[in-house]
Amino acid sequence: MVPTPIAQPAHTPSLTDLDNQLSQRFIELDPGGYFLVYLEVEKGLICAKHFTNVINDKGLACDPETGEPLACQGGEPRQSTHVYTGRTAKELCIAVFEVSDRPCPVTRMDHAAYLGREFVRAELALVAGQEYVQD
């Protein structure tokens, strides 16, 4: 017997639409910094480069050295403070949040939750041999 799919009401957005809509909400930036998440496919690794920043009075991330707002695209390459790696999302989370040789670079719970979701997305892409683009 094949299960009958559960129909959604016409006004209910698809899960993809809901995710896209939620990605557009305002979030406060983490004063602890930000991460660029990427894959090193040939090594089988999920990587997360951590960068420091300062949040100005307008809520913009700024370069700690110059005080200038950071460009979302382009601009001068910045030096990361650390590169975290893991073969799975769990291993990467442990490296970022639980290894005690340095202070945890994440100071906001919503940022921690976001990183966990991104690490899982990256792991799924790595396992499936698909391209990964950070949300």
Image (spheres, rainbow, N blue to C red):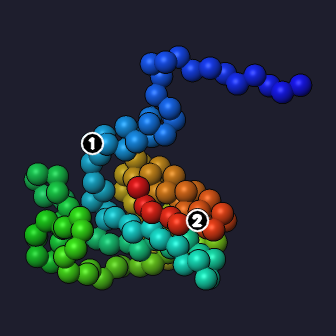
Q: Is residue 87 left or right of residue 16?
A: right
Q: Quadrant for the N terminus, please.
A: top right
Q: Image quadrant of residue 53?
A: bottom left
Q: Residues within 10 Å of mark 2 (few under 14, many from 20)?
A: few
Residue at (55, 62) in percent of width and height: 122
Residue type at mark 1 is Phe
**Is residue 34 found left or right of 64 in the rendered image?**
right
The reply to whether callout 2 and callout 1 are in contact (CB within 8 Å) is: no
Please say if 70 is above or below 1: below
Q: 41 or 115: nearer the eye? A: 41
How far across and down, in percent of the image, does residue 85 sit?
54, 75
Q: Residue at x 45, y 40 (%)?
A: 19
Residues packed near mark 1 inside 10 Å, few (<14), some (14 to 19) or many (20 plus): few
**What amino acid is found at the position of numbered circle 2 in the picture?**
Gln
Residue 3 shows up from this direction:
yes
| Residue in the image at 27% along x and 48% along y | 28
Q: Which mark is residue 26?
A: 1
The residue pinned by badge 2 equals 130
All told, the count of numbered labels is 2
Whether residue 100 appears in this view of the structure is: no
Percent coordinates x, y for residue 41 in the rendering: 59, 77
Q: Is residue 37 left or right of residue 46?
A: left
Above or below, 84 relative to 109: below
At horizontal 67% and vertical 65% (from top left) the residue drawn is: 127
Q: Position of residue 105 (x, y in %)?
A: 39, 66
- The nearer-to-camera label among 2 and 1 is 2
Position of residue 124 measured from the top left corner of the image (x, y, whole percent): 62, 59
